[in-house]
Amino acid sequence: MSQQKVDYADETEIDESLDELPSDEELDEAAENLEANGFNVIVVDSAEEAFGEIESLIPGGASVMNGHSTTLEEIGFDEHLSEGDHDWENLSGEIWSIDDDAERMAARREAQTADYFLGGINAIAQTGELVAADRSGSRIGAYPFAASNVVIVSGINKIVPTLSDALDRLESVAYPLENERAKEAYGVDSEIAKQLIFRQELEDDRTTVVLIRDQFGY
């Protein structure tokens, strides 16, 4: 079951000024600057449209891995990958079927080189940079190089004016909410242990950012 922002509203405080929907002009500027920095950008109006765009991006027979993403859960992608009718190789399902801890960790590292790695993002600067972090690095490790193709899915509520604002959003919106989720899901605090500023994609058509015109994820 998806653990959404509302589930933790009573347990934490966030800077709501860094979690608002941008204007159409601000969205257009963010998309233009992301594209200028080498990212492919797809803007959609709904979770259903986002799901359809993702399906169309991934060819049959591709190996697919997903980093934890509330947004991917909210649009139904995680459930489809694990239980749906597709002919992709579900690396996540293979990993979590491994009982041995060392073997499972090795498989998680190998899965960073999937044909398609999907995940979310913690903040998007209108100036065209992406900011993400996690505790282990199992999500962001694939983004800069390891995976052949990366698909990042985000609500437009993660768009903020500057890179400085994006770093602030990571600390004051994404982290408090993820920390509550981690405590509930894993019994441990989360940490901003490994952080990525994705400034440019230099490989043509490698990284696609799907932006949904609504509030999604943390």
Image: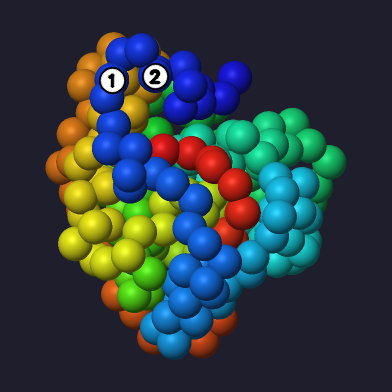
Q: Looking at the figure, which quarter contains the N terminus?
A: top right
Image point 44% across, 87% down: which residue?
Answer: 36
Residue 133: percent from left, percent from top: 27, 48
CB within 8 Å, label 1 to label 2: yes
Name the image quarter holding residue 146.
bottom left
Q: Is residue 80 above or below residue 194?
A: above
Give the side of residue 40 with respect to residue 60, left or right: left
Q: Amino acid at mark 1?
A: Thr
Image point 74% across, 31% down: which residue?
Answer: 83
Query: What SS does tag 1 mark?
Result: loop
For residue 93, the mark is none
Give the side of residue 143 with respect to residue 217, left or right: left
| Frontmost residue, 91 versus 70 | 70
Q: Which residue lies under the disc numbered 2?
A: 9
Residue extending furthest right? 85
Query: What SS does tag 2 mark?
Result: loop
Residue 61: percent from left, percent from top: 73, 60
Q: Amino acid at mark 2?
A: Ala
What's the distance in space between the residues labelled 1 and 2, CA to CA? 6 Å
Residue 67: percent from left, percent from top: 45, 44
Q: How many marks?
A: 2
Name the image quarter holding residue 163.
bottom left
Question: Is residue 139 visible to us here?
Answer: no
Q: Which residue lies under the disc numbered 1?
A: 12
Q: Looking at the figure, which quarter contains the C terminus?
A: top left
| Frontmost residue, 182 versus 216 | 216
Image point 64% across, 65% down: which residue?
Answer: 43
Residue 175: percent from left, percent from top: 26, 35
